[in-house]
Amino acid sequence: MILSDPINLFQVVQRGMSAQMVRMNAAASNIANSGTVSGSEAEAYRPVRTVFQQELDEASGLSSVRVSEVRQSDVAAIRRHDPDHPLADENGDVWEAGIDESAEMVEIMESARQYQNLVEAMQTAKQLMLDTIRSK
């Protein structure tokens, strides 16, 4: 059995930053697809969400996060009557992606804030290491 080296603080931060980027990209994709329509409810765009999973490194005792999956949410598509639309079904309805743009913007702002917090934690750790080296 091959044991990997214990993770360090910088790897924990990097994993967190990567997870927040996936979260931000998912919300950006949702915003980009808001207002899209399709000819049936089944074909309508469904917003996506990231699912995080905690990972504990027993060798170091540090806990990190990873994205275990990006899954479609169960938000229902919105039916809109638009008989002149080229994708309209036999009843004259189109199905619009059920996306709350305000909620998606909040998701982006929260993930950006978490990303920035991780950058600051990494900078603080780096500065503490440099101060320790200089004091010897």
Image: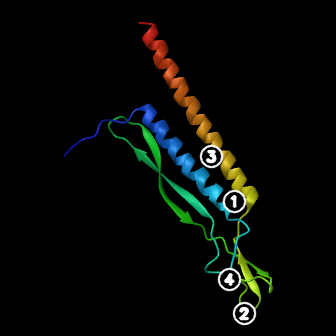
Identify the residue at horizontal 45%, vertical 7% (top origin). Answer: 135
**Please, what secondary structure does the residue beneath circle 2 have?**
loop
**Residue 84 versus residue 49 in the image, above or below:** below
Q: CA distance from mark 1 to mark 4?
A: 20 Å
**Please, what secondary structure does the residue beneath circle 4 have?**
loop
Residue 39 pos. (x, y %): 68, 83
Q: CA distance from mark 3 to mark 1?
A: 15 Å
Q: Amino acid at mark 1?
A: Ile
| Mark 3 vs mark 1: in front | 1
The residue that disc 2 covers is 90
Q: CA distance from mark 4 to mark 2?
A: 9 Å
Q: Earlier in the sequence, mark 4 or mark 2?
A: 4
Q: Earlier in the sequence, mark 3 or mark 2?
A: 2
Residue 22 pos. (x, y %): 55, 51
Q: Which mark is residue 39?
A: 4
Q: Amino acid at mark 2?
A: Glu
Q: CA distance from mark 2 to mark 1?
A: 28 Å
Identify the residue at horizontal 33%, vertical 35% (top origin). Answer: 6
Residue 67 pos. (x, y %): 48, 53
Q: CA distance from mark 3 to mark 4?
A: 33 Å
CB under 8 Å between callouts 3 and 2? no
Query: Number of numbered discs present?
Result: 4
Q: Earlier in the sequence, mark 2 or mark 1?
A: 1
The residue that disc 3 covers is 111
Q: Which mark is residue 31?
A: 1
Residue 35 pos. (x, y %): 74, 68
**Please, what secondary structure does the residue beneath circle 1 have?**
helix
